[in-house]
Image (cartoon, grey):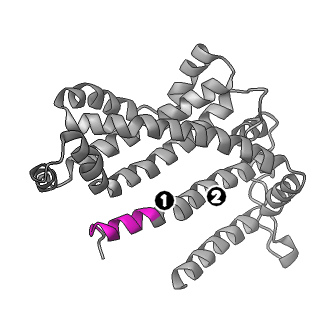
Amino acid sequence: MKRVLITIIFFSLLILVWAALTGDLSAFGLELSLWSPYVLPPPSTVGHYLIDNTVNGKIPLSMLITLRRLLVGYVIGLALGVPLGMLAARFRCVNDTLGMLALGLQALPSVCWVPLACIWFGQTEAALLFVVIMGTLWSVLLSTQNGMKNVPPIYARAARTMGSSPLHTLVFVTLPASAPFVVSGMKQGWAFAWRSLMAAEIYVSVVSGFGIGQYLHYGRELQRMYQVIGIMFIIIAVGLLADKILFSPVESWLHRRWGTDKD
């Protein structure tokens, strides 16, 4: 409760400073309008934009479109990344080839995939999906590989002693033992996928759906800073909620279950 209270007070103070610097507190005698509303709009303008476009359904609809793209690309990235990471951990030749490729491509900024996706797939949903998959795949692959390498070898030896085949040991012993590391990689992959999709939606305009990233792009084009900042808040909120609701509880439970937590 104390931590929540400290967090609320901190962000409330930030909003108050923002309001004071943009003239939103002039009714209270604080005339500190240092920036034009076209440069930094006051919190009230941003709040009105978010409320109005939530009530009329524009923001919820664009969020559904964006989250659908994110989930499809993320699931495909997981389906490819986990098995490939297992292979890279198991076979030296895969580690020296695919593992090295993944290490290099993970360092590539997500926005770098957008021009390639546009050339290959055009202004289509496939281009957006490709960028999300590329944002997810490599981090999941590397985290799975590193997690399986950190599993104590005695687990596999004990399984083989009891008659477990190499494939059975890999799937039912080594992979579950590396689950905390894999989930951490899944969380990292989600963050990369989310950033990748925002970059893709800014540059790729498709008629099949108007995503939240496109609102950010057109806010810049129309010089609506209140729209840009409002959409940025939504992007941040989605990232925080995904971490706090989906990944952090599972990650903490797995670390407690496997005895790898710091407490």
Q: Which residue is disc 2 drawn over?
A: 237
Q: Residues within 10 Å of mark 1 (few under 14, many from 20)?
A: some
Is 85 placed left or right of 201 in the picture? left
Relative to 84, is 185 above or below?
below
| Residue visible at 84% across and 59% down in the picture | 51
Is 170 placed left or right of 28 in the picture? left
Residue 247 shows which numbered tag?
1
Q: How many marks?
A: 2
The quarter of the picture where residue 128 lies is top right
Q: CA distance from mark 2 to mark 1?
A: 15 Å
Is 235 placed left or right of 152 in the picture? right
Q: Is residue 38 visible?
A: no
| The magenta segment | 250-260
Relative to 220, is 242 above or below?
below
- Please say if the residues under marks 2 and 1 sit with CB atoms less than 8 Å apart: no
- Judged by its main secondary structure, the magenta piece is helix
| Residue visible at 73% across and 27% down in the picture | 205
